[in-house]
Image (spheres, grey):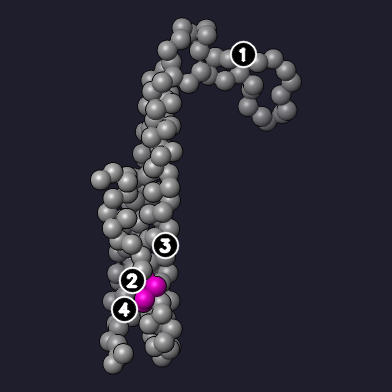
Amino acid sequence: MVGWDIKPQGVQGQLKVTGTHAGELEKALTALMKAMSEAAQAAGTAVPGPQAATPLQGPVAPGQAPLSQKAMGPVAAALGEYLEARRKSLESMAERIEAAILGAVEATNAYCAGDLETAERAQNAAKSVRLDLLKNPGGHK
């Protein structure tokens, strides 16, 4: 390697932008989960009112939820399966973003400290992040 010309302030600026976008992604995912939950609750069940809950008898420890549970309808079940099928992709996306940010920080710190070998290893590790997987988070082709 001949040499590097990293501008730490530029890296810091890009990391701030990336962190902002990651925060926006987190907010969007939180809103998605809330909307899906509300949709599942609003969808109701396929059974008449009094049969929509499973009444269970017995003592409940203080502070615990009651034993009775509402029946889950087909729409709620489908939404749950949809989210579960995408859970790994969403978790993977968050892990890749975190790894890329930490790799950039580590490489820049090593560069600033004059350790070009460590910086090169960190840069190569960051290159190994599969961006193609980030572009297709739902796993559909």
Instruction: Name which residue lies at 43% across and 58% down.
Output: 95
Residue 80, given in percent of the width and then of the height, sits at 43, 32
In this view of the protein, which residue sits in the foreground, 10 or 136?
136
Q: Earlier in the sequence, mark 3 or mark 1?
A: 1
Label 2's element?
Answer: helix
Residue on which disc 3 sits: 98
- The answer to whether 124 appears left or right of 49 in the picture is left
Instruction: Name which residue lies at 69% across and 15% down.
Output: 57
**Residue 9: assigned label:** 4
Q: Which residues are magenta?
A: 123-127
**Residue 127: assigned label:** 2
Q: For the residue marked with disc 1, what is the amino acid?
A: Pro
Give the spatial CA distance, label 4 vs label 1.
Answer: 62 Å
Name the quarter where the N terminus is drawn: bottom left
Q: For the residue marked with disc 4, what is the amino acid?
A: Gln
- Image vertical order of residue 84 relative to residue 91, above or below: above
The local crowd at label 2, few if under 14, some if 14 to 19, many if 20 or more residues have their Cα within 10 Å, is: few
Q: Earlier in the sequence, mark 2 or mark 1?
A: 1
Q: Is residue 41 magenta?
A: no
Residue 37, given in percent of the width and then of the height, sits at 42, 31
